[in-house]
Every structure is written in structure tokens, then in C-alpha cells.
Image: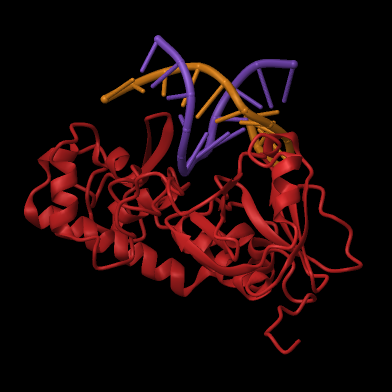
Chain colours: A red, B orange, C purple
Amino acid sequence: MDRPRLDPVVVVRVGAVLAKENGTAGGRGLTMPELPEVEYAAQLARRVVVGRTIRRIRVLHRSQQRTLPVSKRRTLVGDVVESLERRGKYQIFHLRSGRAMVVHFRMTGDWEFVGATDPMPSRARVVIELDDAATLALVDARALATVSLHESGAGLLPDLGPEANTAAFNAAWLGRWLARRTGPVKLALLDQRAVAGIGNVYASEALWFARLDPRHRANTLGAQELRRLVSGVKRAMRKALAHPERYYGAGAGRFNVYDREGRSCRRCGAPIKRVVQGGRSTYWCGGCQV
DNA sequence: ACTAACCTGGTC
DNA sequence: GACCAGGTTAGT
């Protein structure tokens, strides 16, 4: 087959390989896939699965038994992956039968490409075997990633806002959305109905780019602040999409505020602060984010 | 609109 | 050995 294939020696696991290429193995091992990381993972997986016939699906962890019971798995055998689409943090495998398999990495999910002679990774939860002997494994330390099978296009995904890195996400849209939110703007940014693809890490990063205090009430932002926030989100997306190796896997740690409590701000030198909002850590610079 | 639950590796 | 990380959903 002349279809492009991943070199199995180079590509093992998306996050881990990026860290290796970056020469930073052994860092904090942050993964937390958000829009840029899921986009990169989908790009790699796409090259392996598109056009291939599913030979078998294995479930190695009970957390996936609910959504992928044996009866459903059997029906996938022989189906063909026509395309792999990313929407927000979701990956959608469109199948020739008209069905769709939807994967969400949650916090620690990742693809691992397993060669014919490679041992199955210990954290593999769902294994997709293809007709050309390629094997794609969903590895996930915390086993919270989800895989679901849908009979048709209807009800595939929950209600999602515009993609964070597209023109559809703009100040007019965001302003309309935030107007009915009274909580902190950081929490509003995490709502996938407001903007798709932002998670805890890039929410803090985007607010740093926008020079906005994450504790501001969402519905109090002015027009100029809204524009700054939109461009802050897009700057964070653009940087991470252009350099996935700096933000993914053990190579992570190139953030401006995330996980940098007490360190000095790269823009103004003031110490980075941390506060818990909605049960999750928010980081920001008390000096230049006002 | 807020909170618990889902999970388990890594750190305290 | 307790506890924390966190996206999403289900439950209050």
C-alpha cells in the first residue's frame, strides 16, 4: 500500500515522542490535551487510520465496557474509517457504515502507535487493530478518556461553541455569551459552549496574554477587554499549534503562568499567583493582569 | 449554578 | 497512606 505511513521507529506515543524530540524527557510530564494537543494527535492518527478497515477492537479496561460493550465492538469489525475529524477536544472517526466513533482524551489520554513486535503498553485502555497490521492504542493513565459509538450523525457531540482558533470565535460572540455569566471569566472560558477546545491550562495562558485578571466577573468585561481576551485565546492557540513539542507531554513547561506559582512573570517580573476556582487551579500575574 | 463522581499515577 | 490533578456528566 502506498498510502503514507507513520514510521514506527519515530512515532511511538504522541506526547512522549514530542518530548523526546525536544530533549526534555523527564519533565513534569504534563499532558492535559486541549485543542492544540488533540489537533496534533488527530493529525498523526489520521495518517494511520484513514482508509483502513477495522480488524478488531479490544477493550482492556472496565471503564470502557459501558460505552463499548462486546456486542457493539463486534459490529465494528470490517467497517472502514473514512475520515478523522477534530471538533473541540473531541476526535470523531467517521465510518463507512455511517456510524461514528467519538474519542475524548480527557486529562491523560493519548494515542500510542504499537508496532507488530512491540509489547502492548501497560496503560492501553482501548486497542484498535487495522487491516494492515497497524495498531492504534488509546493509552490513558487515569482511565477517564471516553470512547463512544454513535449510529448516525445525530447527537454526536454536546453543544459546542466556535473553535477557539477560528474567526467564528470573536468579540461579538464572546460578549454575547459572557453577558449572561456572573461568575469569574476564567470559569466561563472553560465552558465548551462558549468556546470549544480551551481547558484549564490555556484558560490561564489566554488570560495572561490578554492581561486580564481571571477573577473578573464575566459580564463586566468591556468591549476592549473582550477583544483582548479573544486575541489572547488565539495567541495561546497559535503558539501551541505551531510548536506542539513545547506544550505536550514531558516537554510541557513552556507556559507563561500555568503551574508557575511563585515564579516571576516573564512580562513584568512580579510573582505568579494561584487561586482555586471551581475546584481547579488558576494561575495569573498579579502585576500585569488587571 | 454549584458539587460529586469518575479514575489512578505521582507527590507529599 | 492521604491527597491532588482535572474534563465532563450526572445529580442536587
- Closer to us: A147 or A268: A147
Measuring 55% from the left and 49% from the top, which residue is drawn there? Answer: A151
User: Residue A131: x and y, percent?
Assistant: 79, 70
- Closer to us: A166 or A103: A103
Measuring 75% from the left and 80% from the top, which residue is drawn there? Answer: A7
Q: Is residue C6 left or right of residue A136?
A: left
The answer to whether residue A28 shows anywhere in this view is no
Q: How many marks?
A: 0
Q: Is residue A179 left or right of residue A236?
A: left
* Quadrant hosting residue A167: bottom left
Q: Decide: is A48 above or below A151.
A: below
The answer to whether residue A201 shows anywhere in this view is yes
User: Residue A24: x and y, percent?
Assistant: 65, 65
Location of the N terminus of chain A (image quadrant): bottom right
- Closer to us: A103 or A231: A103
Q: Decide: is C11 above or below A114.
A: above
Most distant residue in the left direction: A223
Q: Decide: is A273 above or below A128.
A: above
- Closer to us: A144 or A59: A59
* Quadrant hosting residue A111: bottom right
Measuring 33% from the left and 65% from the top, which residue is drawn there? Answer: A165
Q: Is residue A17 left or right of residue A183?
A: right
User: Residue A146: x and y, percent?
Assistant: 59, 44
User: Residue A253: x and y, percent?
Assistant: 53, 57
Most distant residue in the bottom direction: A2
Most distant residue in the right direction: A117
Q: Is residue A72 left or right of residue A178?
A: right
Measuring 17% from the left and 54% from the top, which residue is drawn there? Answer: A173
